[in-house]
Image (tube, rainbow, N blue to C red):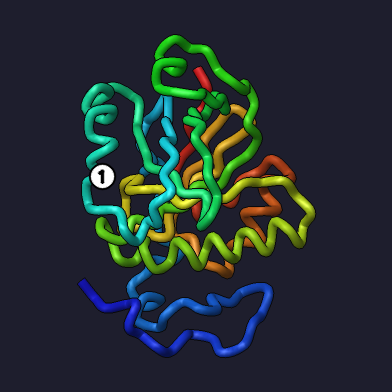
Amino acid sequence: MRAFRAASRSICTTRVARNCNCGVPEELAKSLMNPPEDISNTAPALERLILVPFTQNPNEWPSKIPQLIPLASKYRGTMTSVLASYSGEGVVSDKIVVYPQGASFESLEKLEANMPLDANVGTTLLICSHMQRDERCGVLGPLLAQSFKEEIARQGLEIKVRLVSHVGGHKYAGNVLVCGQGRIVWYGMVQPKWVADIVRSIAEQTTVSELLRGINKSV
């Protein structure tokens, strides 16, 4: 595993709003795939994505998160995936969220009983940041999260940003999932220079075709 975190040089030394991967270590940037690599139809076919809230920073998550194993085992072989979700330091959330349905639940028991607390939790960006599964995601994920938060604020939108555990397809890092409006849009090869385009596509209800891995829709 390359020591991307140890790389001190960035591929850019000044902050530029577009076409810039500011803050990305040079060695990491060299390892990332870029368009026109075709990644269409590489997203898993899912009917449900269950987000379990964690207060522990993703850098501290082990490769396999013990608290998720029982729930993940329960849904093994189905079209349901279970992820750990981190909202940020000091942010406490005890709600379980399910996409593409966009519903939140107070507990696993309420989830099993299909008794949502909120049937429309809005749009959320999920960014793979699972360091112990792939260092590229662990380094790039938080950089993308910060870029997305800044761009979302600049465009005046209400979109949540969450760091999540392993989503699959780490060779396509950065992996970003746009959850909302009854679907999950999977993007791969996302770098900071693409952030503005993705945020704009959410507002316009379109997609960025160059980075599109696939779309899961509500059934």
Give the residue displayed 62% in from the left and 88% down from the top.
Answer: 14
**Which amino acid, mark 1?**
Ile
Q: Is residue 124 left or right of residue 86?
A: right
| Residue 219: image location, x then y, percent | 50, 17
Q: Is residue 109 left or right of residue 72?
A: right
| Residue 145: image location, x then y, percent | 54, 60
Q: Locate the N terminus and report the quarter of the image it occupies.
A: bottom left
180 or 57, which is in the foreground?
Answer: 57
Quadrant of res 194? bottom right
Q: Is residue 47 left or right of residue 3?
A: right
| Residue 162: image location, x then y, percent | 51, 49
Q: Is residue 152 above or below residue 28?
A: above
Give the residue displayed 42% in from the left and 31% down from the top.
Answer: 49
115 or 31, which is in the foreground?
Answer: 115
Q: Is residue 153 above or below residue 178?
A: below
Q: Is residue 37 left or right of residue 182?
A: left
User: Is residue 157 something one can see in this rendering?
Assistant: yes
19 or 168, which is in the foreground?
Answer: 168
Give the residue displayed 43% in from the left and 48% down from the top.
Answer: 55
Quadrant of res 174? bottom left
Q: Which residue is mark 1?
A: 65
Q: Secondary structure at mark 1?
A: loop
Q: Is residue 112 above or below residue 197?
A: above
